[in-house]
Amino acid sequence: MNSALVTLTDMNTRFEDLLKPQGYVVHPWDLDATAQEGRVAENEYFAVAFQPFDAWDTLVAAAEPAELELAASMKHGSSKVWDAYLLLACRETLHSREQFDRLVHIQYDTRRMRKLVVTGVGDELSALETIVRPFMALEKLKEVAQTRDPLATLTQKLVTQGYRRDLLDRAVSLFKDGRSLDAL
């Protein structure tokens, strides 16, 4: 995708499109530390703040002030201060070793909150999926865990391997009743 076609608004919209279907409540947010509107997505576990930037130098200059401001605002009226992530996205692609070293420093400085950084979004909007993927997976795992019956899953797996369903059903029934499998 041509970088002239990907705007900061496009980046915010993509962030929303990725997280809303996962059960997040997403709303706009403005910090004094940044010139561009970002987004905050929240669920029952944590808050994910997203801030897009045009240029790498702008991201670097705003990262720490944005983190400080976000941490301060989350302490007032939110229980998620310790479960907050700041996702920083930049349209510009990095080329120098110094830029990559700075990216690593930003991500590994977790004194106030955890941060993830993605660059080159101006070339490919789908790059945003890289930094939101961990939050999507957690929601999917929660859904699978809530809907799956482990004993039924085990029974079905054993049936496909050739075990008799009637014996398996009896074993599960004994297990649920707290009785010994010797009664089989």
Image (tube, rainbow, N blue to C red):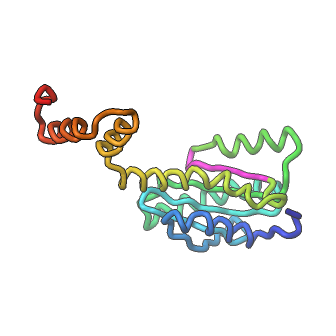
Q: Image quadrant for the C terminus?
A: top left
x, y percent for residue 100:
80, 41
Residue 123 is covered by the magenta coloring: no
Q: Nearer the viewer, residue 168 or 13?
A: 168
Residue 66's place in the image compared with 176, above or below, is below
* Residue 23 appears left or right of 108: left
x, y percent for residue 90:
77, 58
Q: Residue at x 81, y 67 (%)?
A: 6
Q: Residue at x 55, y 68 (%)?
A: 20
x, y percent for residue 88:
69, 56
Please provide the residue range marked out in magenta.
Answer: 111-119
Q: Nearer the viewer, residue 149 or 38?
A: 149
Q: Nearer the viewer, residue 56 or 21?
A: 21
Residue 153's place in the image compared with 61, above or below, is above
* Residue 123 appears left or right of 159: right
Q: Residue at x 84, y 40 (%)?
A: 98
Q: Image quadrant for the N terminus?
A: bottom right
